[in-house]
Image (cartoon, rainbow, N blue to C red):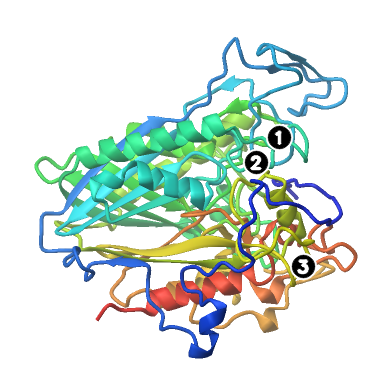
Amino acid sequence: MIRHIALLTLALVPLAGCDGETPPPTDAGPGQLDAGTQDAGPPPFAPDSFCPGAPGCAAGEGGTFEVGAARASITPTIDERTDVMTLDVNGNGTFDTGDEFADRDGEPGFQGVWIAGFGNARPASDAHDDVHATAVALRNADTTIVLVALDVIGWFRPDMERIRELVADLAIDHVAISSTHVHQNRDTIGIWGISADRSGRSEAYNEHVRQQAARAIRDAVAALRPAHVQYADVDLRTIEGGPARLVGDLRDPIILDPFIRLMRFVDASDDSTIATVVNFAAHPEYLGSRNTRISGDVGHFLRAGIEAGVPAPDGAATEGVGGITLWMNGAVGGQIGPNQLDVRRWDGTPVVQRDDVWEFTRTVGEQLAYHCLRALGPDGGSVTDETAALGYRTRSFFVPVQNTRFHLAIVLGLFDREGHNWDPRRALIPDENQPDLLTEVTVIDVGRATMITAPGELEPELFHGGYDGAYTPPTAMIVDPANPNPPALDRAPAPPYLRDLARSDATQVWLLGMTNDYLGYLMGEYNYVLSSSAPYFDEADGDHYEETNSVGVDGWPTIRRELEALLTWSAE
């Protein structure tokens, strides 16, 4: 099983706040009551902000529907002043015993560009392709929404707020910022440095990402022009070989989101493509853990294929649609990604990851692009509307951090974000004195589509169910009979699921994972099992790695309650 987060394994001790300041022991915030008002009962649920219907944002339709798109490079600098590994004895892509590096920056020690994902000490050697901040701006009447995707493993809410501040003068109603969760770019979170107690995060690089994201947003807003919108879908269960040709699962229950959802925005004057927005769920780790080249991974080949075209099964060229493609990842919890795949070229020849990881990744990305282009083509069953009503509602709230490894990452500064509602002058005591994190969820409406954000890696079954096997590939069993600690399917949540709570006239429901925050894995209570000896530090038997990299057992229930309330809330 892939390990893509590593943290300290230290004993809990009294620790000071990472910024040297002492926040108040109680920190009331959005949706919270302070101690003096507890007797008043909980306030009625309300979003922090919403459009249309709010003051200054009366309408989300009835004007001219406009779209603009832009991208900016966030590729890290790797040049003659960058420390790089020069000898990798065992060829594992990791700087470990016996390996050597070139000290080019004059600073003591190996100050590498540390790649996020899998484990520690993976230094970048160069860039295979550019990674990007991509923005698509949408406007109708009084409502302006911008969708942003960053080619990073994750993006904390405080960094997201700084991007929003950089574009506050543009009068955008909501900016939704998603990470593609790529495992082949520099660490933006802080836990993939040279060792588990050394941050891999570079403030200079994160600031570069913030500035470039703001630039892409500005350019997208400046490019707004009248547009039409085309909606299309791909069901991977219907392709030859099924989902196993392109994406798989490792955690019981084996349940995927097999749908690729597409919106293509075209210039109203000539039908040329402005942007294509793609929602597909997969860990971008097809290049594997030994790769040391910066890359957008499978997302690079997917986006390039949609824009410029790809080979078709008959050997002919399938034309691309042009424009800018933005990929927003989906429900990837449970190790949804390049697992147990049967990847084949169009002629049926197998492509094995360990034999040629670049050909493997290219084949998957280009075939994904082909299926998208076919769905957008004249015989793909798509629907085009001349306009699209826009709307959003968003809510911020506190999530308890029960994971003791995450406690350490917060107070030791590996995570560059504030903990709330705890007293750092006292010992960290789970369930007694532990930090909360301020996070956010959003529901966005774009014409026929509703988008639901999740601030982490959500398990697909929590989005759309599937405990009956409807989303289990025919080549897999929903639960491995040899699993020593299997999920209790008799306790699995019943409908309605998140998808079911979307507005009734939505013909597409999207799940935008790792959007507006990054909190690790989000799992249901029915299949949440911790080690009895060292919870969060050790894994329980069976498929329970994800628990060690989640905020805690109450994380998803807290987020789910807020999302359910947000989905059912109405301004009317």
Cα gap from disc 3 to disc 1, whole angstroms:
26 Å
Q: Nearer the viewer, residue 329 or 95?
A: 95
Q: Secondary structure at mark 1?
A: loop
- Tell me if label 2 and label 1 are in contact, CB under 8 Å: yes
Q: Which mark is residue 193?
A: 1
**Could you say which disc has been placed on residue 77 in the image?**
none
> Dot 3, crowdedness within 10 Å: few (<14), some or many (≥20)?
some
For the residue pair 566 and 327, the one nearer the viewer reads as 566
**Residue that carries the numbered disc 2 in the rendered image:** 190
- Label 2 environment density (alpha carbons within 10 Å; few <14, some 14–19, many ≥20): many
Q: Please give the name of the residue rendered at 50% of the width and 50% of the height, measured from the top-left corner.
A: 158
Q: Amino acid at mark 2?
A: Gly
User: How far apart in space, not on screen, are marks 2 and 1 (Cα)?
Assistant: 7 Å
Left-right relation of 246 to 409? left
Residue 330, image x and y in percent?
49, 56
Q: Which residue is mark 3?
A: 430
Q: Nearer the viewer, residue 255 or 290?
A: 290
Residue 349 point in image, percent of width and height: 59, 36
Q: Quadrant of the C terminus?
A: bottom left
First in sequence: mark 3 vs mark 1 = 1
Whether residue 466 can be seen here: no
